Image (spheres, rainbow, N blue to C red):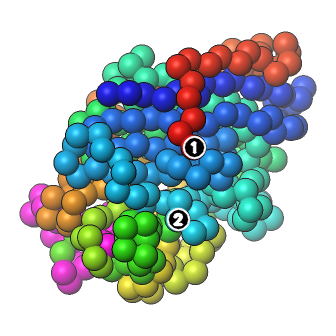
Amino acid sequence: MNKHLFCSLAVLLSVSGLAVAGPVINPVILEGNYIRTTIGQAGTLGDGYQPTPGLQYDASGTGNFNGGDFLTPGSPWDYFMLKADQTAGVTGNNNDPAVGIRDFRPMLLEEVSGLTGFDNHVRWIGASESARLTNEYFFNDDDQHIQVLTTITAYSRLDNLRFARSIDPDQDADSYGEDETLNGRGYDANHDGDYSDPGDAAPRNWTHSQGAQSGLVLGLFSDSPYAHDTGVSSGWEIDPDFFLAANDDGDGDHTLGLAFSLGDLLRDESISFTYSYVLAANLSTAGLPAEEEIQSRSVPEPDTLALLSLGVVGLGAFARRRARYNK
């Protein structure tokens, strides 16, 4: 397996610890047997400054990623969003710079594959005026899902904190010229799920799209103990409350969303939670990872004091290993 890695570290901190500028950070490309993806400077899947890979999938598990991209055709959309009573609306980042949503300035992007128990692992840290946010993306070579650990640390009190991820699935766009997908919540045909059956997932845990031509599946999943729900939006919805309300706009060229209701955070308090991007050849083969599977491995957050010391130095160090773009 060839792994193309762009690793960089760039930190610029003010005296208060907030990021005051956003350095340009080179993306990291991770590749397993089933999944090939980029983690970009916005801390999302994909990077708007390079067309591919956004999110590629090989159902055969042979590392053949010539069948198209699930994310980058058209205007790519992978977005994380945060909202609290004290924030001025919604803050978040999208992978496409043309959209202009980049509220969390990048502080750190590092590739730590093989150091934390996972074959492929990237850690990204960004900061807004209200919070620092860490996204950890990790998967093993034989996995068909990307696990994500998000940690939010409040710079000031955040009441009624909500967070969401949304993605615009385009698995049939490259191969069939088809942007519309068959979308749903829950795992069975009635979208009601059945906890007694390990093959099903309740609507609040799982939302998915299926290519009308290919049958390929992209979904968002979590069985986190924190309150959460899923939704399907006919537009590029940026409000976590839309997905927490379990809205489902049905089939079409829509976005999927998974949102969490996280309660209140005091200043300097942190909260961590997990979720997954799931890819599959069809719905019957979609494997949904359990929360304990994620938490059984150590995924440490970078030491804050180390970040502060790097900030005093300036932009820090730039490391590049086996770097190569696929144009």
Q: Which mark is residue 73?
A: 2
Mark 1 Cα-neighbour bin, 10 Å: few <14, some 14–19, many ≥20: few
Q: Residue at x 30, y 44 (%)?
A: 64
Residue type of the residue flagged with mark 2? Pro
Mark 2 Cα-neighbour bin, 10 Å: few <14, some 14–19, many ≥20: many
Dot 1: what SS?
loop
In the picture of the structure, the residue carrying the numbered disc 1 is 327
Q: Which mark is residue 108?
A: none
Please identify the quarter of the rendering in which residue 303 is found: top right
Dot 2: what SS?
loop
Between 168 and 266, the one nearer to me in the picture: 168
Q: Residue at x 86, y 38 (%)?
A: 21
Q: Residue 318, image x and y in percent?
A: 71, 18
Q: Residue 157, image x and y in percent?
A: 73, 48
Query: In the figure, 286 relative to 193: above or below?
Result: above
Q: Where are the magenta residues, as a range? A: 189-211
Between 61 and 113, the one nearer to me in the picture: 61
Q: Residue 289, image x and y in percent?
A: 26, 47
Residue type of the residue flagged with mark 1? Lys
Any part of residue 230 in sight = no
Q: Report whether 62 appears left or right of 131.
A: left
Nearer to us of marks 1 and 2 is 1
